[in-house]
Image (cartoon, helix red, strand yellow):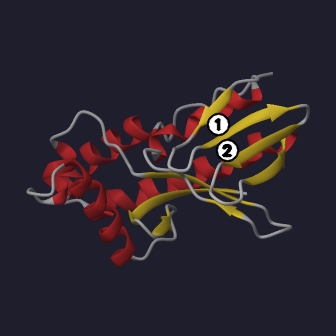
Amino acid sequence: MLRPVIELDDLSFLPLSGDLTPAELDQVLTRMGGYLDDETDPLTALLDTDLIIVPGGLLVTDPVTGVVIEPGCCGGVEDWTGWAQVLAGGRHQFGHSPETWAELRDDVVQVRRDSDPVPVRIDLPAAELPAMLRAVQQDLTGFLGLVRGWAPPERAGELARLLDWSLRITEPLALPG
């Protein structure tokens, strides 16, 4: 299973979806704005940038074993569409410290984290990855809907367009085949 998450601090992630409470939404957008400029109010910081970067990425969970692989350092939600490259035979790195990546091996997407002392691996059926990515896109679309209610009406459309463009939320997924 894949879930888009924002890293709130070094120890916690919050899933992004249309299910966020108003307090969680405010926390998420404040974190995004503070990541860009912690001296300015979050809305101004978000709207004064050309590209929004969201610390976090896709959280990978093995539903059978319960093993979780969190996005690594320098991963971002804006990189979520890179997972589609894995199906074309590419390798997608989604963070380091520890290094975390996904690659296609036969009919399995292997997701790996080189952690000390024990590396972790989750195998996802490659045939299921497109549906997982569409679910991520639905979660992000729901989140985008909430954003429109967070900003003042005169700025809501501008913020939603910028987030949509930066995170490639409504862009068609480039899935092979």
Q: What whole-number distance in Å separates the C-alpha atoms at marks 2 and 1?
A: 8 Å
168 relative position to 92: left or right: left
| Residue 83, numbered label | 1
Name the residue at the front extreme. 117
Type of residue at label 1? Trp
Q: Are marks 2 and 1 in contact (CB under 8 Å)?
A: yes
**Residue 133's mark?**
2
- Secondary structure under badge 1? helix
Q: Quadrant of residue 108?
A: top right
Give the residue displayed 58% in from the left and 58% down from the top.
70
Residue 31 appears left or right of 45: right
Q: Residue furthest right?
A: 106
In front here: 22 or 79?
79
Left or right, 6 with respect to 126, comes to: left
Question: How many residues crowd mark 1 within 10 Å: few (<14), some (14–19), many (20+)?
Answer: many
List x then y, in percent, for residue 62: 78, 61
Q: Residue 146: horizontal and vertical position, in percent?
A: 40, 62
Vertical order, 35 against 82 (above or below): below
- Given residues 116 and 145, the one toward you in this image is 116
Q: Residue at horizontal 80%, vertical 66%?
A: 63
- Depth check, mark 2 against mark 1: the one in front is 1
- Determine which quarter of the picture holds residue 103: top right
Which quadrant is home to the N terminus? Answer: bottom right
Q: Earlier in the sequence, mark 2 or mark 1?
A: 1
Residue for point 33% across, 40% down = 161
